[in-house]
Image: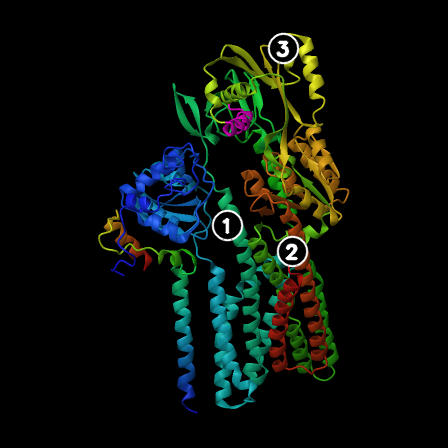
């Protein structure tokens, strides 16, 4: 279309003047605070706005308004993308296309609508050295070719500044989905075979036309057997070689016998005794069932892949007299690393800075950050909360405690993926089918050997486990679809078998039951200048990046303008494990734990007073004591708040007679408080990652079956070992990797829903199995009696398959979950 | 009825060509992404006078790749 569809685009500033709504950000539309002078909510939005304006891409704002929603809570904390320009990146994540160009895949977080697609494609095309490019919106996948000289770091930073965070994942096969091709071809073959068989249903059985149709059907069956049914034969063969039984074996036997019998009849000229059309339908239905099921799992996998796509970390290492970015696995023992605020520690080491504040939440489950001093041990996986810190590597990445634990979790996951109920069904199905065929052979042998063979083969064909093989995949793919709509991604199909056996649900505390950030629940003031003291605490804690600072800042923003009352702050000193103190406006203020007061207070009666006052706080809370010049200033009870919906969700699980346990790395008192407040059966605090794993494994040998929900590195082992491991979208990579089920958000009510869904799935599958069993019994009896011909079989077979699909859909509608 | 000797193989030939077309579409990844092309319809890049920094040569390569 060459004519502009809308009125001529006004200049950007005009547009904005017309829609001028001073309370929202010009770029992202989020609400601005009243005190903000700038028309933008942040520097990031301003940058993007100017970038868009400078290039004349106003179309973006039109599309945005047309499409509606934007991501509300965009995080503008841009990670380092230096890795993208390194040789290591090109080696590990790219494919060499020509001498100078490479192909690669990025995962973009934050694609929401058409405007996003448009903007990303524009940015890509405007970037120097980017060749062929393709953006897949559904999978958030951006694949492109780039020149060696192209500055990918800059490109990624631009994308991140625009709100699309770049992630990497070693890419799997680049081939299109082969299942779809096979399915389409087999559909066409089955339809045409049916067409060629139609004349025989009308009574044609002799003559040249009958021969023509029969031989044409035969010609179409050859590719069906050779190409379409190959997966079944391949799997049956694998099963045969390993000595096991699987459901593909009866399918392979059924197909082979039908093919042999029909070919013999064809050669003999008995054209009305052919099973070619039944074979076509059988293969087509089976492929459809498997395809739909696999697409469900693939969807869940790609959603998780999106969450897992991260950026390999480059650590700054002191080498050859300067700081060099080095990929974590190349760091040698004894080298010195520099970590900035927010960096994740890549390996175990020893702190060489004077002090540091680290968040160990994902490593040990501790909800409060810890202060470390020089020579303390730093664990891989902890996050640097303070300023730039230095550490000396004491282990390589593979030898770090976290990495060793990951290897253990890997082997646990492999172990639990072995057993399958499907195979159990095949184990009795195959012998039953074979003995029925043998029975046919014996019964009809006295009549005539030819008739006996024919009956035996007919039995093998009619018992074909089509309906059986469809019952379970149909129910499961319906369940996968429903789960995904409800924000539950089921990565492992095993969940459908193991979840009903679960009798114990284990939760991590911090970040799962609680919000994972501290809140003040009670406070006591012993000063007449509480506002000044609040501001002083805020400044003191900000200087060490302690999360308490954020808490006080929030309160200060309610009572505005108080921050100016602080003139200067000096002599800030961090006491590891205790707290922080400094001189604020010439007054010495200390903030720290009650236990560490003697490090700050000069007089014992002050300590006694504070301890007495703190005794009235609820049990289990953390206590922060503030002193002014060694005299009592204030006391705060700090607690990691329990999520709003948690109580109701746990009660629902309790009604299922499940045992609810909480295992946490946090202090036992804090855990006990959660147990008292919520319908939990027991709670254990101070659990190290190994303890959690041991807890689960020890009780598994006592025949307990577990669902474990956690989010941190410390939960990884237990998640891998539990029958069902659950985590959620905001969890650490390790948890995401080993979990069987990933919830979109930390919404515990989804667990109850999952139980419902799996129950309904089981019911649907059982009904389908019962139906197919009933069908098989009747069909086998009829064919043993010699009453069933190919015609009846051809009608019965698809009918039974369709009824299995129907009963599954009906069960889910009835379940209404 | 003799016409069947021609018509039936012809019908098979037709479905074979349909199968071939399907294979071609599959090989060219026509079924890989069912969402993004629907969104691209909304863009109005062809509008003259809209100064977009599109590298013409690159655009050409894209087109060649698509076909």
Above or below, B17 relative to A24: below
Q: Quadrant of residue A580?
A: top right
x and y percentages locating residue A542 in the rendered image: 50, 22
Q: Per the image, is A550 magenta?
A: yes
SS type, badge 3: loop
Residue, disc 1:
A302
Label the magenta part by its dominant secondary structure: helix
Above or below, A91 relative to A594: below
Q: Quadrant of residue A783?
A: bottom right
Residue, disc 3:
A601
x and y percentages locating residue A163 in the rendered image: 41, 41
Of tags 3 and 2, which is closer to the observer? 3
- In the orientation shown, which residue stands out farthest toward the top? A602
Q: Per the image, is A293 magenta?
A: no
Report if the CB atoms under discs 1 and 2 are less than 8 Å apart. no
SS type, badge 2: helix
Disc 3 from disc 1: Cα separation: 56 Å
- In the orientation shown, which residue stands out farthest toward the right? A702
Tell me which segment is drawn in magenta. A545-559
Q: Which numbered disc, 1 or 2, marks the residue that appears first in the sequence? A: 1
x and y percentages locating residue A196 in the rendered image: 50, 81
Q: Nearer the viewer, residue B55 or A194?
A: B55
Question: On what subunit does the disc labeled 2 rest?
Answer: A
Quadrant where the image shows the C terminus of chain A: bottom right
Above or below, A520 relative to B55: above
Q: Which numbered disc, 3 or 1, marks the residue that appears first in the sequence? A: 1
């Amino acid at each position: 279309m060459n004519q502009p569809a809308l009125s001529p685009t006004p200049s950007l500033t005009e547009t904005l003047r017309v829609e001028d709504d001073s309370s929202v950000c010009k770029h992202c539309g989020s609400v601005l605070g009243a005190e903000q002078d700038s028309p933008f909510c942040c520097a990031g939005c301003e940058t993007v706005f100017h970038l868009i304006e400078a290039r004349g891409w106003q179309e973006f704002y039109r599309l945005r308004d047309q499409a509606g929603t934007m991501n509300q809570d965009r995080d503008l904390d841009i990670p380092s993308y230096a890795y993208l320009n390194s040789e290591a990146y090109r080696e590990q994540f790219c494919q060499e296309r020509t001498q100078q160009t490479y192909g690669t895949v990025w995962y973009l977080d934050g694609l929401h609508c058409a405007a996003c697609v448009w903007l990303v494609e524009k940015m890509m095309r405007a970037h120097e050295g980017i060749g062929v490019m393709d953006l897949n919106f559904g999978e958030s996948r951006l694949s492109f070719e780039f020149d060696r000289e192209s500055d990918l770091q800059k490109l990624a930073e631009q994308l991140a500044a625009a709100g699309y965070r770049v992630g990497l994942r070693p890419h799997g096969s680049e081939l299109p989905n082969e299942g779809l091709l096979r399915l389409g071809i087999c559909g066409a073959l089955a339809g045409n075979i049916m067409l060629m068989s139609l004349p025989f249903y009308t009574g044609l059985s002799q003559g040249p036309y009958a021969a023509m149709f029969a031989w044409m059907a035969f010609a179409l069956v050859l590719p069906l057997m050779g190409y379409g049914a190959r997966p079944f034969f391949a799997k049956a063969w694998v099963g045969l070689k390993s000595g096991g039984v699987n459901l593909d074996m009866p399918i392979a036997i059924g197909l082979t016998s039908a093919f042999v019998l029909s070919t013999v009849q064809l050669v003999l000229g008995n054209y009305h005794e052919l099973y070619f059309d039944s074979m076509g339908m059988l293969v087509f239905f089976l492929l459809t069932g498997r395809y739909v099921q696999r697409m469900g799992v693939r969807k869940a996998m790609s959603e998780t892949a999106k969450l897992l796509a991260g950026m390999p970390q480059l650590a700054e290492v002191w080498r050859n007299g300067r700081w060099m970015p080095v990929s974590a696995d190349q760091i040698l023992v004894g080298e010195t690393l520099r970590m900035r605020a927010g960096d994740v520690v890549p390996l175990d080491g020893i702190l060489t800075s004077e002090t540091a504040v680290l968040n160990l939440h994902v490593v040990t489950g501790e909800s409060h950050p810890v202060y470390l001093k020089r020579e303390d041990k730093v664990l891989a996986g902890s996050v640097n909360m303070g300023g730039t810190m230095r550490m000396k590597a004491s282990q390589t990445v593979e030898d770090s405690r976290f990495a060793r634990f990951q290897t253990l979790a890997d082997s646990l996951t492999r172990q639990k993926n072995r057993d399958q109920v499907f195979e159990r069904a095949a184990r009795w199905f195959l012998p039953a089918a074979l003995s029925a065929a043998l029975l046919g052979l014996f019964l009809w042998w006295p009549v005539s050997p030819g008739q006996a063979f024919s009956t035996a083969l007919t039995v093998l064909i009619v018992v074909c486990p089509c309906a059986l093989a469809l019952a379970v995949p149909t129910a499961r793919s319906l369940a996968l679809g429903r789960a995904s709509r409800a924000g539950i991604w089921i990565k492992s199909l095993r969940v459908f078998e193991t979840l009903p056996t679960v009798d114990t649900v284990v939760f991590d505390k911090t970040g799962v039951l609680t919000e994972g950030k501290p809140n003040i629940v009670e406070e006591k003031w012993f000063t007449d200048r509480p506002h000044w003291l609040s501001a002083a605490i805020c400044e003191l804690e900000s200087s060490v990046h302690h999360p308490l600072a954020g808490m006080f800042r929030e309160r200060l923003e309610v009572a505005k303008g108080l921050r100016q009352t602080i003139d200067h702050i000096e002599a800030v000193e961090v006491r590891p494990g205790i707290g922080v103190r400094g001189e604020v406006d010439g007054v010495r203020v200390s903030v720290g734990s009650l236990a560490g007061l003697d490090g700050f207070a000069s007089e014992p009666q002050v300590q006694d007073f504070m301890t007495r006052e703190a005794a009235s706080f609820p049990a289990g809370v953390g206590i922060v004591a503030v002193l002014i010049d060694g005299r009592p200033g204030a006391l705060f009870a700090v607690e990691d708040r329990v999520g709003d919906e948690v109580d109701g969700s746990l009660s629902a699980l309790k009604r299922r007679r499940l045992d609810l346990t909480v295992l946490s790395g946090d202090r036992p008192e804090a855990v006990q408080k959660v147990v008292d407040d919520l319908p939990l059966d027991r709670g254990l605090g101070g659990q190290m990652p190994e303890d959690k794993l041991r807890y689960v494994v020890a009780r598994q040998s006592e025949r307990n079956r577990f669902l474990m929900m956690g989010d941190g590195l410390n939960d990884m082992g237990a998640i891998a070992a539990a029958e069902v491991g659950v985590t959620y979208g905001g969890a650490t990579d390790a948890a995401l990797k080993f979990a069987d089920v990933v919830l979109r958000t930390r919404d515990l009510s989804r667990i109850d829903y999952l139980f419902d869904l799996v129950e309904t799935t089981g019911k649907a599958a059982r009904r389908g199995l019962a139906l197919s069993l009933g069908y098989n019994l009747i069909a086998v009896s009829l064919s043993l009696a010699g009453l069933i011909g190919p015609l009846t079989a051809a009608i019965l077979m698809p009918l039974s398959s369709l009824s299995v699909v129907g009963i599954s859909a009906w069960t889910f509608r009835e379940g209404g979950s | 009825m003799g016409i069947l000797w021609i018509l039936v193989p012809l019908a098979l030939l037709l479905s074979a060509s349909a199968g071939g077309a399907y294979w071609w579409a599959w090989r060219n990844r026509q079924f890989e992404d069912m969402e993004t092309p629907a969104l691209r319809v909304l863009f109005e890049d062809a509008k003259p006078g809209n100064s977009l920094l599109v590298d013409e040569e690159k655009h050409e390569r894209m087109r060649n790749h698509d076909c």
